[in-house]
Image (cartoon, helix red, strand yellow):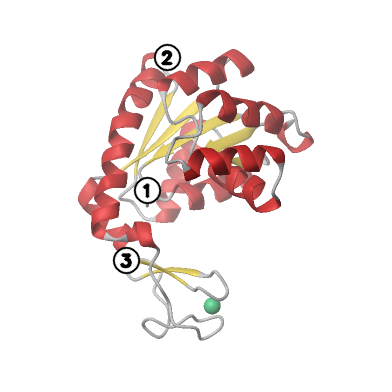
Protein backbone atom coordinates (compact mmCIF):
# COMPACT_ATOMS: atom_id res chain seq x y z
CA UNK A 1 0.00 0.00 0.00
CA UNK A 2 1.37 3.38 -1.04
CA UNK A 3 -0.04 6.18 1.06
CA UNK A 4 0.41 9.91 1.42
CA UNK A 5 -0.57 11.57 4.69
CA UNK A 6 -1.68 15.20 4.57
CA UNK A 7 -2.53 17.30 7.61
CA UNK A 8 -1.79 20.61 9.29
CA UNK A 9 0.90 20.84 11.96
CA UNK A 10 -0.60 19.25 15.13
CA UNK A 11 -3.26 17.35 13.17
CA UNK A 12 -1.75 14.13 14.52
CA UNK A 13 0.07 12.94 11.40
CA UNK A 14 2.99 11.43 13.29
CA UNK A 15 0.77 9.45 15.67
CA UNK A 16 -1.46 8.14 12.90
CA UNK A 17 1.52 7.27 10.70
CA UNK A 18 2.97 5.12 13.51
CA UNK A 19 -0.31 3.22 13.87
CA UNK A 20 -0.79 2.74 10.13
CA UNK A 21 2.71 1.37 9.54
CA UNK A 22 2.09 -1.20 12.27
CA UNK A 23 -1.34 -2.12 10.99
CA UNK A 24 -0.31 -2.48 7.35
CA UNK A 25 3.31 -3.46 7.92
CA UNK A 26 4.60 -0.70 5.67
CA UNK A 27 7.49 1.76 5.98
CA UNK A 28 7.19 5.27 7.44
CA UNK A 29 8.90 7.83 5.25
CA UNK A 30 9.27 11.23 6.87
CA UNK A 31 11.35 13.43 4.59
CA UNK A 32 11.86 15.92 7.43
CA UNK A 33 13.37 13.23 9.66
CA UNK A 34 15.50 11.97 6.78
CA UNK A 35 16.91 15.41 6.06
CA UNK A 36 17.71 15.97 9.74
CA UNK A 37 19.40 12.57 9.87
CA UNK A 38 21.57 13.28 6.82
CA UNK A 39 22.62 16.58 8.38
CA UNK A 40 23.48 15.03 11.73
CA UNK A 41 25.45 12.21 10.04
CA UNK A 42 27.33 14.83 8.03
CA UNK A 43 26.89 13.05 4.70
CA UNK A 44 27.53 14.75 1.36
CA UNK A 45 23.79 15.12 0.93
CA UNK A 46 23.47 16.44 4.47
CA UNK A 47 26.08 19.12 3.77
CA UNK A 48 24.20 20.13 0.63
CA UNK A 49 20.91 20.40 2.54
CA UNK A 50 22.56 22.28 5.40
CA UNK A 51 23.97 24.95 3.12
CA UNK A 52 20.63 25.42 1.36
CA UNK A 53 18.85 25.80 4.70
CA UNK A 54 21.53 28.12 6.12
CA UNK A 55 21.03 30.49 3.19
CA UNK A 56 17.32 30.59 4.00
CA UNK A 57 16.32 28.65 0.89
CA UNK A 58 14.02 25.68 0.54
CA UNK A 59 15.38 22.29 -0.32
CA UNK A 60 14.72 21.89 -4.05
CA UNK A 61 12.16 19.47 -5.44
CA UNK A 62 14.91 17.64 -7.33
CA UNK A 63 16.92 17.06 -4.18
CA UNK A 64 13.88 15.82 -2.25
CA UNK A 65 12.92 13.52 -5.12
CA UNK A 66 16.46 12.15 -5.24
CA UNK A 67 16.23 11.30 -1.53
CA UNK A 68 12.77 9.75 -1.85
CA UNK A 69 13.81 7.65 -4.83
CA UNK A 70 16.71 6.15 -2.89
CA UNK A 71 14.53 5.58 0.18
CA UNK A 72 11.72 3.66 -1.54
CA UNK A 73 14.26 1.33 -3.14
CA UNK A 74 15.14 0.03 0.35
CA UNK A 75 14.00 -3.39 1.54
CA UNK A 76 11.47 -2.26 4.14
CA UNK A 77 9.44 -0.51 1.42
CA UNK A 78 8.62 -3.70 -0.46
CA UNK A 79 5.22 -4.01 1.17
CA UNK A 80 4.46 -0.33 0.75
CA UNK A 81 5.03 2.94 2.57
CA UNK A 82 3.40 6.01 3.98
CA UNK A 83 4.75 9.47 3.21
CA UNK A 84 4.59 11.99 6.02
CA UNK A 85 5.46 15.57 5.09
CA UNK A 86 5.89 14.76 1.41
CA UNK A 87 4.80 15.66 -1.24
CA UNK A 88 4.35 19.26 -0.10
CA UNK A 89 3.43 20.66 -3.50
CA UNK A 90 1.66 19.57 -6.66
CA UNK A 91 4.99 19.59 -8.52
CA UNK A 92 6.39 17.11 -5.97
CA UNK A 93 3.24 14.99 -6.24
CA UNK A 94 3.58 14.85 -10.02
CA UNK A 95 7.23 13.84 -9.72
CA UNK A 96 6.30 11.15 -7.22
CA UNK A 97 3.74 9.78 -9.70
CA UNK A 98 6.48 9.66 -12.33
CA UNK A 99 8.58 7.45 -10.06
CA UNK A 100 6.01 5.07 -8.60
CA UNK A 101 3.14 5.13 -11.11
CA UNK A 102 0.56 6.40 -8.68
CA UNK A 103 -0.17 6.24 -4.97
CA UNK A 104 -3.08 4.16 -3.62
CA UNK A 105 -4.64 6.78 -1.34
CA UNK A 106 -3.96 10.21 0.10
CA UNK A 107 -5.25 10.49 3.66
CA UNK A 108 -6.17 14.03 4.65
CA UNK A 109 -6.58 14.65 8.37
CA UNK A 110 -8.70 17.79 8.37
CA UNK A 111 -9.28 20.07 11.36
CA UNK A 112 -9.99 23.79 11.86
CA UNK A 113 -7.07 26.18 12.36
CA UNK A 114 -8.25 27.41 15.80
CA UNK A 115 -8.06 23.88 17.15
CA UNK A 116 -4.68 23.20 15.53
CA UNK A 117 -3.34 26.41 17.01
CA UNK A 118 -4.58 25.46 20.49
CA UNK A 119 -2.97 22.04 20.16
CA UNK A 120 0.30 23.44 18.81
CA UNK A 121 0.73 25.93 21.60
CA UNK A 122 -0.13 23.25 24.19
CA UNK A 123 2.79 21.06 23.14
CA UNK A 124 5.66 20.61 25.56
CA UNK A 125 8.90 18.67 25.23
CA UNK A 126 11.52 17.48 27.65
CA UNK A 127 14.91 18.98 26.72
CA UNK A 128 16.69 16.13 28.50
CA UNK A 129 15.02 12.88 27.35
CA UNK A 130 12.94 14.08 24.39
CA UNK A 131 9.56 12.97 25.79
CA UNK A 132 6.64 14.95 24.36
CA UNK A 133 3.47 16.10 26.09
CA UNK A 134 0.42 18.15 25.33
CA UNK A 135 -1.30 20.21 28.00
CA UNK A 136 -4.68 19.44 26.37
CA UNK A 137 -4.48 15.85 25.21
CA UNK A 138 -1.48 14.28 26.91
CA UNK A 139 -0.51 16.25 30.02
CA UNK A 140 2.43 15.37 32.25
CA UNK A 141 1.45 14.12 35.74
CA UNK A 142 2.91 17.22 37.36
CA UNK A 143 2.39 20.39 35.30
CA UNK A 144 5.56 21.50 33.55
CA UNK A 145 7.66 18.53 34.73
CA UNK A 146 8.73 15.45 32.70
CA UNK A 147 7.17 12.18 33.95
CA UNK A 148 10.14 10.16 32.75
CA UNK A 149 13.08 12.13 34.11
CA UNK A 150 11.80 15.05 36.20
CA UNK A 151 13.27 17.74 33.94
CA UNK A 152 11.45 21.05 33.48
CA UNK A 153 9.44 20.94 30.21
CA UNK A 154 9.98 23.49 27.47
CA UNK A 155 8.15 24.66 24.36
CA UNK A 156 9.56 24.35 20.85
CA UNK A 157 10.31 27.72 19.25
CA UNK A 158 7.94 26.99 16.38
CA UNK A 159 5.06 26.05 18.71
CA UNK A 160 4.32 29.64 19.75
CA UNK A 161 1.10 31.36 18.59
CA UNK A 162 2.88 33.58 16.04
CA UNK A 163 5.00 30.81 14.57
CA UNK A 164 1.99 28.47 14.65
CA UNK A 165 -0.12 30.92 12.63
CA UNK A 166 2.64 31.25 10.05
CA UNK A 167 3.01 27.47 9.77
CA UNK A 168 -0.74 27.03 9.30
CA UNK A 169 -0.77 29.71 6.60
CA UNK A 170 2.05 27.96 4.74
CA UNK A 171 0.25 24.66 5.14
CA UNK A 172 -2.92 26.00 3.52
CA UNK A 173 -1.09 27.65 0.65
CA UNK A 174 0.77 24.47 -0.18
CA UNK A 175 -1.68 21.74 0.73
CA UNK A 176 -4.94 22.99 -0.71
CA UNK A 177 -3.78 22.50 -4.32
CA UNK A 178 -2.39 19.12 -3.26
CA UNK A 179 -5.71 18.06 -1.72
CA UNK A 180 -7.43 19.07 -4.99
CA UNK A 181 -4.84 17.17 -7.01
CA UNK A 182 -5.66 13.90 -5.23
CA UNK A 183 -9.39 14.64 -5.05
CA UNK A 184 -9.54 14.96 -8.84
CA UNK A 185 -8.02 11.50 -9.15
CA UNK A 186 -10.49 10.06 -6.63
CA UNK A 187 -7.60 9.15 -4.35
CA UNK A 188 -8.42 11.42 -1.43
CA UNK A 189 -9.70 10.01 1.84
CA UNK A 190 -10.65 12.79 4.23
CA UNK A 191 -10.95 12.15 7.94
CA UNK A 192 -12.22 14.46 10.67
CA UNK A 193 -9.19 15.38 12.79
CA UNK A 194 -11.39 16.57 15.66
CA UNK A 195 -12.22 13.01 16.67
CA UNK A 196 -10.05 11.44 19.31
CA UNK A 197 -6.86 9.66 18.23
CA UNK A 198 -8.35 6.14 18.29
CA UNK A 199 -11.42 7.19 16.31
CA UNK A 200 -9.25 8.78 13.64
CA UNK A 201 -7.22 5.56 13.29
CA UNK A 202 -10.36 3.41 13.08
CA UNK A 203 -11.89 5.68 10.51
CA UNK A 204 -8.77 5.62 8.32
CA UNK A 205 -8.44 1.84 8.44
CA UNK A 206 -12.12 1.27 7.67
CA UNK A 207 -11.81 3.74 4.79
CA UNK A 208 -8.69 2.16 3.32
CA UNK A 209 -9.56 -1.45 4.02
CA UNK A 210 -8.15 -3.89 6.53
CA UNK A 211 -5.42 -5.32 4.32
CA UNK A 212 -2.49 -3.59 2.71
ZN1 LIG B 1 12.44 13.86 30.36
Task: Quadrant for the N terminus, please.
Answer: top right
Q: How crowded is mark 3: few (under 14 residues within 10 Å), some or many (20 or more)?
A: many
Q: Quadrant of residue 209?
A: top right
Does 107 sit above or below residue 23? above
Question: Element at badge 3?
Answer: loop
Q: Quadrant of the C terminus?
A: top right
Residue 185, which numbered label?
Answer: 2
Q: Distance between the residues labelled 3 and 2?
A: 36 Å
The tag on residue 188 is none
- Please state which of residues 56 and 18 is positioned toward the viewer in this rendering: 56
Pointer 3 and pointer 1: residues touching (CB < 8 Å)? no
Give the side of residue 171 with respect to residue 200, left or right. Answer: left
* First-in-chain label (2 vs 1): 1
Q: In this view, does 36 lie to the left or right of 176?
A: right
Give the residue furthest to the right. 75
Marker disc for residue 9:
1
Q: Which mark is residue 122?
A: 3
Nearer-the-camera pick, 191 or 70: 70
User: How crowded is the residue under tag 1: few (<14 C-alpha within 10 Å), some, or many (20+)?
Assistant: some
Mark-to-mark CA distance, 3 and 1: 13 Å
Compared with 136, 5 (above or below) is: above
Q: Where's residue 103, x and y in %?
A: 55, 22
Numbered disc in front, either 3 or 2: 3
The answer to whether 183 appears left or right of 161 in the picture is: right
Amino acid sequence: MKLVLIGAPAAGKGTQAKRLIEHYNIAHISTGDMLREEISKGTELGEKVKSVMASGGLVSDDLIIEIVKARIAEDDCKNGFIFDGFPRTVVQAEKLDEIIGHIDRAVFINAPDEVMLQRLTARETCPKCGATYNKLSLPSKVAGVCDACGEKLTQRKDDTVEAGKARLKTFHEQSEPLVDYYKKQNLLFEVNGLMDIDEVTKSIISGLGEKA
